Image (spheres, helix red, strand yellow):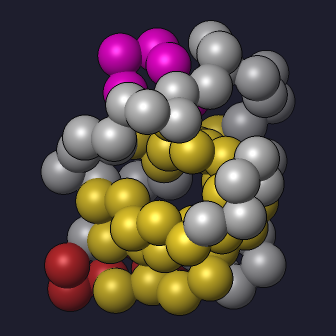
């Protein structure tokens, strides 16, 4: 689990937890959280439902990063 770019505590109070990768679309803004900390926040670039993985363009670094639902809870605004 990446920790080098850990953001502060949850930043979006009205976000809804994503239960299925299939509900995400390119351009959606999401957060990847673990243990109450937001590690990635940005725009969905691509999804792989079979792998439970989503690629996010992190808004703070501009880097494209994969996030697995095995490692993170995903939250959508």
In the picture, residue 21 is in which quadrant?
bottom left
Q: Position of residue 1 (x, y in %)?
A: 25, 40
Where is 1 relative to 56, above or below? above
Q: 2 or 31: nearer the eye?
A: 2
Q: 61 or 76: nearer the eye?
A: 61
Give the residue displayed 62% in from the left and 25% down from the top. 7
Q: Position of residue 11 (x, y in %)?
A: 76, 23
In the picture, residue 48 is in which quadrant?
bottom left
Q: Position of residue 23 (x, y in %)?
A: 55, 73
Where is 25 relative to 57, above or below? below
Q: 14 or 64: nearer the eye?
A: 64
Residue 74 can be seen, yes or no: yes
Residue extent of the magenta highlight: 33-38
Give the residue displayed 18% in from the left and 51% down from the top. 70
Give the residue displayed 33% in from the left and 41% down from the top. 2
Give the residue displayed 53% in from the left and 87% down from the top. 46
In the picture, residue 34 is in which quadrant?
top left
Q: Position of residue 52 (x, y in %)?
A: 26, 70
Q: Is residue 49 left or right of residue 57?
A: left
Where is 11 relative to 45, above or below? above
Q: Is residue 68 left or right of residue 36?
A: left
Q: How many marks?
A: 0
Residue 17 can be seen, yes or no: no
């Amino acid at each position: 689990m990446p920790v080098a770019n850990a953001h502060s505590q949850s930043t979006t109070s009205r976000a809804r937890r994503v239960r299925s990768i299939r509900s995400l679309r390119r351009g959606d803004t999401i957060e990847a959280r673990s243990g109450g900390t937001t590690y990635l926040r940005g725009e969905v670039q691509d999804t792989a439902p079979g792998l439970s993985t989503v690629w996010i363009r992190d808004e703070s670094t501009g880097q494209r990063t994969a996030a697995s639902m095995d490692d993170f809870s995903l939250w959508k605004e």
